[in-house]
Image (cartoon, helix red, strand yellow):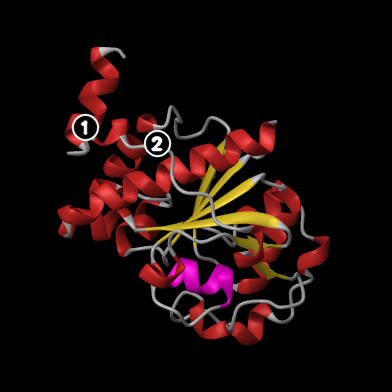
């Protein structure tokens, strides 16, 4: 392992967490499928969204470029990885960038820890309204979805359970595996949860590797 990689993990205060054993596999019957018709409740969308206006949009006919005007998102339009975060912060909206500022810097380090890089085979987005989310997934066709934060996890999984109850279990959205983890902004305030976040990242890495086989 290179010093550069060790430095990444050290900055995340995860060493020697990289030596953890492979996360325990969850039995298939524990998977929770979210169908395309079973969209998350509207109360999970970004506060202040004009749902009356959203209902007049023909989402099924929207192309990739058009969809971008309805998202705070960035990345590879052919990405295998889709990361969905909690509703965008004021800074995210101001900069029109997913995961801006300190939370974004931490997320970049987290991605580097599993050998991923912003803009390369990943797409980052903050929680859009349910119809925009469905269209995003339909156009992107990711192999794996990682939700970052309780609101994002509840919306994508159509669940009222807390994040700790959703973590460590297999879920699906439109037949795509979903793994829940913490929002980077939460980790900045709760350092102790970084170790569990690393476990979630390992689970995501292993899930993607299994999909490639």
61 horizontally vs 78: left or right: right
Check contact, mark 2 vs mark 1: CB within 8 A. no
Q: Nearer the viewer, residue 205 or 99?
A: 205
**Front of the two marks 2 and 1:** 1
Label 2 SS: helix
Q: Which mark is residue 16?
A: 1
104 horizontally vs 176: left or right: left
Instruction: Single out the residue that lies furthest toward the right.
Output: 61
Q: CA distance from mark 2 to mark 1?
A: 17 Å
112 horizontally vs 29: left or right: left
Q: Quadrant of residue 54?
A: bottom right
Q: Quadrant of residue 209?
A: top right
Residue 53 on the magenta segment: no
According to the picture, the residue beneath numbered tag 2 turns out to be 111
Prevailing secondary structure class for the magenta stretch in the rendered image: helix
Residue 191 x/y as whole percent: 16, 53
Image quarter (top left, top right, bottom left or bottom right) of the C terminus: top right
Instruction: Single out the residue that lies furthest toward the top.
Output: 2
- How many other residues sit within 10 Å of disc 1, few (<14), some (14-19) or many (≥20)? few
Residue 130 x/y as whole percent: 62, 73
Question: Which residues are drawn in magenta?
Answer: 151-158
- The residue depicted at 77 percent of the width and 59 percent of the height is 62
């Amino acid at each position: 392992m290179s010093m550069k990689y060790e430095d990444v993990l050290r900055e995340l205060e995860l060493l020697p967490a990289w030596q953890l054993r492979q996360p325990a596999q969850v039995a298939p019957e524990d998977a929770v499928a979210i169908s395309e018709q079973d969209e998350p409740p509207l109360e999970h969308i970004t506060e202040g969204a004009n749902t009356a206006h959203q209902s007049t949009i023909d989402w099924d006919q929207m192309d990739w470029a058009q969809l971008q005007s309805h998202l705070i998102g960035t990345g590879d339009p052919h990405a295998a990885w889709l990361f969905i975060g909690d509703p965008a912060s004021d800074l995210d909206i101001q900069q029109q960038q997913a995961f801006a500022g300190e939370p974004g810097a931490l997320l970049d380090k987290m991605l580097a820890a599993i050998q991923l890089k912003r803009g390369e085979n990943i797409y980052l987005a903050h929680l859009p309204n349910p119809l925009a989310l469905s269209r995003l997934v339909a156009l992107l066709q990711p192999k794996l979805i990682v939700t970052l934060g309780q609101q994002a996890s509840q919306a994508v999984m159509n669940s009222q359970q807390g994040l700790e109850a959703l973590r460590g279990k297999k879920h699906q959205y439109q037949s795509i595996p979903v793994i829940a983890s913490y929002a980077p902004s939460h980790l900045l305030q709760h350092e102790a949860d970084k170790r569990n976040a690393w476990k979630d990242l390992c689970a995501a890495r292993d899930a993607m590797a299994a999909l490639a086989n």
